[in-house]
Image (cartoon, rainbow, N blue to C red):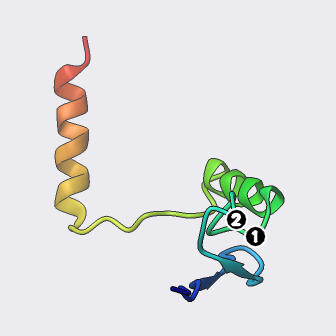
Amino acid sequence: MTRNKRTVNCPRCGTPVLWGTESPFRPFCSERCKMIDLGAWANEQYRVAVKGGDDDAEAGSAESERDAP
């Protein structure tokens, strides 16, 4: 039985990558693209959106003040 391998595009450079054990850096095409992407996260170039308004931010700062010595 022959199975078709799924391909995905590298999120960094767009190169097609086979999704399988023969692609150890998947979804990235190479260790280089993987490390560039990791560096972008470390430098806070990517952000995860948070649901909620300013009330959530104020509640967080109030909790921080309450926990302070």
In the rendered view, does 42 fall on the left or right side of 2?
Answer: right
Marks 2, 1: nearer the viewer? 2
Residue carrying label 1: 29
Q: Residue furthest top?
A: 69
Q: Does 65 appear above or below 69?
A: below
The circle drawn on residue 13 is none
**Residue type, numbered disc 2:** Ser
Q: State the CA–CA distance, disc 2 to disc 1.
A: 7 Å
> Would you identify the image quadrant in which residue 17 lies?
bottom right
The picture places residue 15, in percent across and down from the top left corner, at 77, 83
Q: Nearer the viewer, residue 57 or 39?
A: 39
Q: Residue furthest front?
A: 1
Q: Nearer the viewer, residue 35 or 65?
A: 35
Instruction: State if disc 1 and disc 2 touch (CB < 8 Å).
Output: yes
Label 2's element? loop
Q: Residue sitting at 79 percent across and 63 percent down?
A: 30
Residue carrying label 2: 23
| Neighbour tally class for label 2: few under 14, some 14-19, many 20 plus, Cα within 10 Å | few
